[in-house]
């Protein structure tokens, strides 16, 4: 039986766009109070307006460790608990491959995508362990399982690191009632695609997984009984462009 989430508390980073936005709206629809974090207050306000009066905003750059801890402490002080963390803040850069990635861009991707997720995970773990219950959802990537030229070394390394970090939580905190799931999406039609070196046409984006689809997955995970841990979950478009390009070399394929 799925859990009733009414009045439970979720903290979503990267909540201003994409998967974070989808997750925030989906969790609010289930009656949760959602705390929205991101770097752009205007975008967070727009998302909050879609959350049926069940959202508050905490502007945050997850790469700032002190700010992450302060924000988590403020949420816990206000609500007394954090039931779900959705660590969705992430970036990639346009010049992302070995021949053109800069040290500055490498550091930016690692600091937000991996270090930022670590800071948020670490900030909520003591409270979740004390509660004897808690769910951490780390938004990883297909790139966390499969090395690809498309995503570049920094993003690929960050997401592989996130997957390992995620499972270490289950190993160390599962006995305290804390569960962690790394969601590993293939291509999702979110603004991060705008930084691709080769632009993605609108018709291709329409075939991809959408933010709302990921929101539904987040909502499903949050509703599972607390004794159930989905360690990782891979979601990809049925029209998987990587698969299609490989298959076309071998078998008849539709356009």
Image: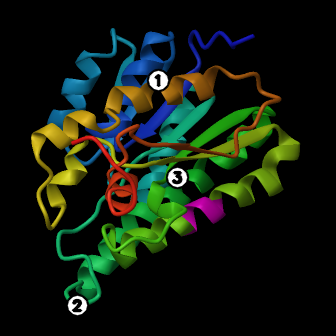
Residue nearest the viewer, comparing 107 with 202:
202
Q: In this figure, what is the number of numbered marks?
A: 3
Say what secondary structure mark 1 lies in.
helix
Looking at the image, residue 209 sits to the left or right of residue 192; the answer is right
How many C-alpha atoms fall within 10 Å of the one at disc 1: few (<14), some, or many (≥20)? some
Secondary structure of the residue carrying tag 3 is helix
Mark 3 — residue? 120
Give the Cα distance between marks 3 and 2. 32 Å
Earlier along the polypeptide chain: callout 1 or callout 3? 3
**Label 1, label 3: how far apart the Cα atoms are:** 22 Å
- In front of the other: 198 or 56: 198
Residue holding disc 1: 216
The magenta segment: 161-165
Quarter of the C terminus within the rendering = top left
Do residues under tags 3 and 2 come within 8 Å of each other at their CB atoms? no
Q: Which residue is mark 2?
A: 99
Comes first in the chain, label 3 or label 2: 2
């Amino acid at each position: 039986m799925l859990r009733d989430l009414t009045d439970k508390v979720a903290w979503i980073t990267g909540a201003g766009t994409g998967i974070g936005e989808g997750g925030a709206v989906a969790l609010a629809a289930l009656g949760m109070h959602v705390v929205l974090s991101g770097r752009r207050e205007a975008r967070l306000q727009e998302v909050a307006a879609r959350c049926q009066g069940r959202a508050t905003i905490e502007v945050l750059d997850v790469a700032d460790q002190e700010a992450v801890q302060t924000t988590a402490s403020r949420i816990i002080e206000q609500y007394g608990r954090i039931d779900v963390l959705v660590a969705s803040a992430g970036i990639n850069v346009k010049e992302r491959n070995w021949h053109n990635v800069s040290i500055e861009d490498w550091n930016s991707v690692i600091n937000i995508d991996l270090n930022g997720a670590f800071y948020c995970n670490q900030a909520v773990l003591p409270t979740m362990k004390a509660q004897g219950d808690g769910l951490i959802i780390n938004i990883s990537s297909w790139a966390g399982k499969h090395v690809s030229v498309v995503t570049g070394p920094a993003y690929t390394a960050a997401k592989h690191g996130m997957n390992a970090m995620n499972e270490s939580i289950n190993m160390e905190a599962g006995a305290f009632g804390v569960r962690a799931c790394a969601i590993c999406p293939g291509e999702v039609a979110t603004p991060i695609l705008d930084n691709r070196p080769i632009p993605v046409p609108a018709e291709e984006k329409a075939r991809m997984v959408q933010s709302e689809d990921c929101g539904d997955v987040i909502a499903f995970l949050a509703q599972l009984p607390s004794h159930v841990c989905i360690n990782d979950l891979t979601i990809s478009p049925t029209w998987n462009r990587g698969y299609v390009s490989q298959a076309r070399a071998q078998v008849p394929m539709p356009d």
